[in-house]
Image (spheres, helix red, strand yellow):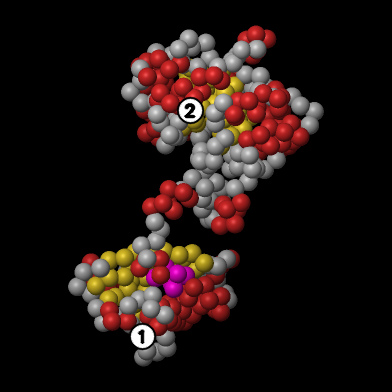
């Protein structure tokens, strides 16, 4: 028997973060318990949880401070409210049946406790650590989280201490705003006028990148650090190198031209996947997009069916092959993006034909009312905000 649990509860300097293991005395947790008693380290002295002096709970529980204890003031927070909170939580978990009562003599618990050096409110320290310990125990013995929950939440979550989101694609369809005007201040102005939305992606357009280099991605993040940013490189050669440079500048996705050689595209897709960012192939001027895709070892994350600005007068689109691309490639994770003259009238048709990403430039960026134009298109793609994520965070 070997279970692991974790919980974070509270706020401010008194916030509690508990990591724990519970298992048999004769197993690895029991060995860790014994080692904790005998292998001491300065500033991280382990101690038994006690409800009060001379009254430990069962299963016996060993507490180890995560933060180095440097003085008696810090020690008193551990050997006081934190110690009592953990012990009471263990005892209550047994009383409530979370921990099997017939196993308390066979089990031990090892807990790591976080106490901020600047925490001052002893009641909050107790309150938060009690709740976190009890929750972590319950989670451990219920094998929380399930794989289903991990897969659902992994691209939605925001780590509270990190302070920013690392967005991933999970809530199709999306509205991708192409910032092609080669003026960084104009781009930032557009960003400042956009409504807050989980559906919005930003594209560092090719003209913008050509003028400022890929460092422009970091400049755009000054205006919105949480947004998903695509570097529209239109790579034709040295695919691996351009992915690496974009990755170092914090791009979330990179774009290659479908006119590049097979070798370049394969290295491009491979390197993006290795680094954990999205790869996209722009099929502008490619006669047979499916033939190009089927010829690759691995397909990209995003396929862009693109009509160039200079072609828009003809009025033709490639939207009729969206479903064919999805069907013949048979990859449920594949995103198909459409670009070229998207506006409020054509957006609905593109979504109906199966587009996952609407790439829009001038209709939004050159509008007299950027927010209104953006909201027009957001009304087509769907809800602005994932309310479940907001509630959880």
Give the secondary structure at mark 1: loop
Task: Residue 302: give its label.
Answer: 2
Residue 34 x/y as whole percent? 24, 74
- Name the residue rendered at 57%, 66% in the picture: 11
Toward the viewer: 16 or 177? 177
Give the secondary structure at mark 2: strand
- Name the residue rendered at 54%, 55% in the picture: 160
Q: Toward which corner of the image does residue 215 lie, by quadrant?
A: top right
Q: Toward which corner of the image does residue 242 lie, by quadrant?
A: top left
Magenta region's main secondary structure?
helix
- Name the residue rendered at 56%, 57% in the picture: 392
| Residue under pointer 1 | 56
Q: Write the start and end of the magenta stretch as one range.
A: 132-137
Residue 304 x/y as whole percent? 52, 22
Residue 382 is left or right of residue 231, and the answer is: right
**Pair 2/1: label in front:** 2
Q: Residues within 10 Å of mark 2 (few under 14, many from 20)?
A: many
Please, is residue 337 above or below residue 31 in the view? above
Residue 162 x/y as whole percent? 52, 51
Toward the viewer: 371 or 354? 354
Which residue extends farthest bottom? 54
Which badge, 2 or 1, comes first in the chain's sequence? 1
Toward the viewer: 291 or 65? 291
Toward the viewer: 270 or 305? 305
Task: Residue 34: give its label.
Answer: none
**Is-magenta flag for residue 150?**
no
């Amino acid at each position: 028997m070997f279970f692991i649990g974790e919980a974070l509860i509270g706020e401010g300097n008194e916030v509690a973060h508990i990591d724990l293991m519970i298992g048999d005395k004769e197993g690895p947790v029991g060995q860790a318990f014994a080692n904790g008693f005998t292998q001491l380290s300065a500033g991280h002295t382990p101690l038994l949880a006690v409800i009060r002096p001379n009254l430990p709970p069962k299963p016996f529980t060993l507490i180890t401070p995560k933060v180095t204890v440097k003085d008696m003031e810090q020690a008193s927070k551990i050997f006081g409210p934190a110690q009592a909170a953990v012990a009471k939580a263990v005892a209550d978990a047994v009383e409530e049946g979370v921990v099997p009562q017939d196993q308390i003599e066979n089990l031990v618990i090892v807990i790591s406790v976080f106490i901020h050096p600047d925490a001052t409110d002893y009641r909050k320290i107790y309150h938060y650590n009690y709740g976190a310990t009890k929750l972590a125990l319950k989670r451990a013995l219920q094998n929380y989280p399930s794989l289903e929950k991990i897969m659902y939440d992994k691209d939605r979550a925001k780590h509270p201490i990190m302070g920013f989101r690392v967005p991933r694609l999970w809530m199709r369809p999306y509205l991708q705003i192409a910032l092609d005007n080669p003026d960084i201040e104009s781009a930032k102005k557009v960003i400042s006028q956009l409504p807050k939305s989980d559906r919005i992606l930003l594209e560092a357009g090719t003209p913008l990148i050509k003028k400022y280099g890929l460092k422009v991605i970091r400049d755009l993040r000054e205006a919105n650090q949480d947004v998903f940013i695509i570097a529209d490189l239109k790579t034709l050669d040295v695919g691996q190198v351009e992915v690496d440079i974009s990755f170092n500048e914090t791009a979330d996705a990179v774009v290659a031209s479908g006119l590049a050689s097979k070798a370049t595209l394969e290295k491009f897709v491979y390197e993006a996947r290795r680094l954990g960012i999205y790869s996209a192939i722009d099929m502008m001027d490619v006669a047979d997009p499916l033939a190009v895709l089927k010829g690759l070892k691995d397909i990209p994350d995003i396929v862009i069916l693109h009509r160039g600005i200079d072609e828009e007068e003809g009025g033709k689109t490639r939207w009729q092959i969206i479903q064919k691309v999805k069907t013949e490639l048979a990859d449920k994770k594949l995103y198909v993006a459409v670009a070229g003259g998207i506006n409020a009238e054509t957006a609905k048709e593109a979504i109906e034909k199966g587009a996952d990403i609407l790439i829009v430039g001038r209709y939004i960026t050159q509008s007299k009312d950027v927010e209104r134009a953006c909201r027009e298109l957001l009304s087509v793609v769907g809800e602005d905000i994932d309310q479940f994520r907001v509630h959880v965070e």
